[in-house]
Amino acid sequence: NHVNVVRVFNYYLYPEQLVGYIVMEQIAGSDLPGHIKDHPEQINEVFEQTIDGFCHLEQKQILHRDIRDSNLMVSRDGVVKIIDLGFGKRIETSDDFDKSISLNWWCELPEEFASGTYDFQTELYFVGKLFEQVIARNDIDHFKYRDVLGRMCQRNPRDRIASFAEVQSSISQ
């Protein structure tokens, strides 16, 4: 339960039909690129809220595993919502960081994919690349977290900032 993560009310699994359904709160607004296109002045606040939401997921040991522009919504009143947890995964052991899904990724892949790893640093990378893309597409020059974003987007996880909590701490200063 976090203001920047869509609320999930229930889920229904039908294994015999190989299908499942997740019942979530409805978000009236637009996806991240659409919102920033219409409100480029809000890029810093949208970034902060996104980091808050992913920091919460990290603290709860939940990987989203499908970070793309259509899975970040901004409500009409400017609240970021991380949506579509259909590929989400609760982490209980280190084995849970094995890359068990392969999606059509929209940006250059991080180096840890070569070793079959998908962890919170991978999530950090994809969130960073998403914001890097939105900022470039909208020719935004007033983004105040460029240094942090640059550290999020390093392909090598050893060069990347360590966690969403570290990003949150950096932007709170």
Image: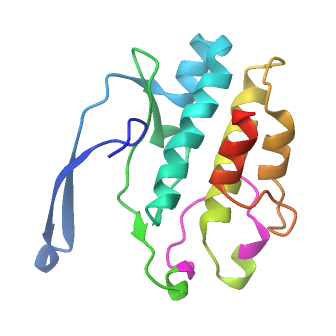
Q: Is residue 137 left or right of residue 54?
A: right
- Would residue 32 be visible to someone looking at this image? yes
- Would residue 106 be visible to someone looking at this image? no
Residue 126 versus residue 114 in the image, above or below: above
Which of 108/157 is in front? 157
Which of 47/71 is in front? 47
Q: Residue at x 41, y 69 (%)?
A: 89
Which of 104/166 is in front? 166
Q: Residue at x 66, y 63 (%)?
A: 122
Q: Residue at x 20, y 64 (%)?
A: 20
Q: Residue at x 84, y 57 (%)?
A: 154
Q: Quadrant of residue 159?
A: bottom right
The secondary structure that dominates the magenta segment is loop
Q: Residue furthest front?
A: 173
Residue 62 placement (x, y as % from top left): 44, 64
Residue 34 placement (x, y as % from top left): 54, 22
Residue 111 belongs to the span the image colors magenta: yes
Residue 137 belongs to the span the image colors magenta: no
Residue 146 placement (x, y as % from top left): 84, 34
Q: Is residue 13 left or right of residue 110?
A: left
Q: Quadrant of the C terminus?
A: top right
* Boundaries of the magenta span: 97-112
Number of numbered discs overlaid on the protein picture = 0
Q: Quadrant of residue 137?
A: top right
Q: Is residue 66 left or right of residue 23?
A: right
Residue 124 versus residue 39 in the image, above or below: below
Residue 134 versus residue 103 in the image, above or below: above
Chosen colour scheme: rainbow
Q: Is residue 146 left or right of residue 5?
A: right
